[in-house]
Every structure is written in C-alpha cells, then in structure tokens.
Image: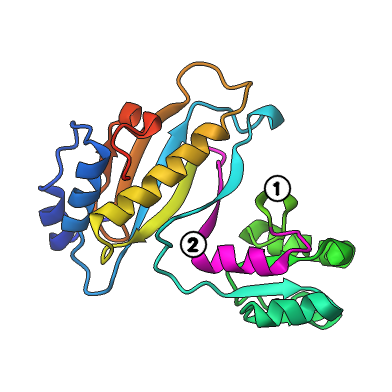
Amino acid sequence: MAKKGKKYLEAAKLVDRNFYYEPAQAMDLAKKTATAKFDESVEVAVRLGVNPKHADQQVRGAVVLPHGTGKTVRVIVFAKGDKAREAEQAGADFVGAEDLIAKIQNEGWVDFDVAIATPDIMGQVGRLGRILGPKGLMPNPKVGTVTFDVSKAIQEVKAGKIEYRVDKAGIVHAPLGKVSFPAEKLLGNFSALMEALMKAKPSAAKGIYVRTVTVSTTMGPGVRVNALKASTGDSAAQ
C-alpha cells in the first residue's frame, strides 16, 4: 500500500470516517481537506445497487451541471457542409469529416474531451470505435452527442454537460467542480447529478439503489455522504 503524505494525513484528521455527513456539510469539508497548491477537482463516487453485467441494469446518461465543471472542455465535431460551419460558429475546437477521422485513425490523435457527430456521418465515425470507445470518447445518441443540433450540443458541453456511466464495480464517478467553487455551487452540481441518477434507475434494479456516496478532492481523503439525503435531495441547493 502506498504511504500517505503528511498533508494527506493532516487533512484526514478533519474527517470522521465513521460518520455520514449531510450533502452541504460534505461539500464544505471536502474544500477544507484540499491542501495542494493547484485548484483541485472535487469528485463524487456513487455506488449503486445494480449489477452492470446485466444489460437491463446499466446506468448511463448525461446531465448539465448548473455551475459547470470549472474545466475548459475541448470539443470536436464530425460534420460536413452547413453543419460543419454551424459547429465552427458554435465554438467547436476542431471540426471535420474524413480528414478528422483519418487523423484519429492514423495518428491515434485524441487530444480532446468530447466528440459530437451528426447522424449522417456516424457510419464512418464508427470505424473509430476501437480507439475512442475505451476512452469514453465515442459519440453516442443516448447522451446527446449524435445529433443534427450541433449548436445546442456544443453549448451544453461547454456549459458543463457531463456523461456518467456505471463501471464494472457498480460505481459512478463524476466531477462536481473545483475546490475554488463556493460550496453552494458544488452542492447545486451534486444535487443535479443525484437527481439524474435517480431518474436513470433501471426498473430491474432491486433493493437499495444508492448504496454509498463519497466526495473527495484530487489529493484529499474521501468524505462519506448521507446516501438517503443525497438520493432524496433533502439538502439540495435551491
């Protein structure tokens, strides 16, 4: 096991590992545990009562965080003609069709965060599945990244739209913002994510759906959140 540093150990003393904090308390405490010289990210891990091995218990979707993520998102768009020009005007960082597909396919170029594609070009973009799929960068209609409304898609991504997906262990990992965010904004983003996860609950999921919720910063210790309050939104920011 890796040895924890002095700053981490000091921050960990602020957290009661046997206590489940209210969502608002957890955001405040997470900010206090940040000790790095850079603006750490604040993230949440939600363990769900689903079995990802079953197709009818997959949890995947997208949500627009009302206060953004604090990160500059690089967006590429696969489109032609008018839709390519629309994408450029909407602020896409890279726009192309066969040329962009070739760059990724031949050079392994993946210097971007989100890929959007118009439906008419997805047949060609599909060839990139082996490269983009494992990195979570493949355009997908289920999360709104395969669409003819490229302007809206770009604006949402730039404004703070994130994708979430349950992993093999039944956990959803998602960003909530930066340590520099006021706690109220972190809480607002947290509430939006939890609401989206509740709406995405598979009908095949039985028993307790939200098992555990843990908030942490990039370099800080985990802060356990009252899962019941988190899932019901009792402490949601207005």
Helix, strand or loop status at disc 2: loop
Residue that appears at 60% across and 45% down: 61
Residues shaded magenta: 145-171
Q: What percent of the width, then of the height, locates residue 8?
A: 18, 57
Q: Identify which amino acid the numbered label 2 is placed on.
A: Gly
Q: Which residue is identified by label 2?
A: 160
Asked if 177 appears above or below 28 in the picture, the reply is below
Q: Write down the quadrant of residue 19 in the picture.
A: top left
For the C terminus, the quadrant is top left
Residue that appears at 18% across and 49% down: 29
Front residue of this view, candidates 187 and 71: 187
Q: What percent of the width, then of the height, locates residue 1?
A: 30, 50
- In the image, is 18 to the left or to the right of 136? left
Front residue of this view, candidates 199 and 41: 199
**Tag 2 or tag 1, which sits nearer the N-term?**
1
Asked if 208 appears above or below 99 in the picture, the reply is above
Residue farthest toward the top in the current orientation of the protein: 207
Q: Write down the quadrant of residue 183 in the picture.
A: bottom left
Work out whether residue 56 can be spotted: yes
Front residue of this view, candidates 147 and 139: 147
Helix, strand or loop status at disc 1: helix
Q: Indicate which disc residue 142 carries.
A: 1
Indicate yes or no whether the magenta region holds residue 155: yes
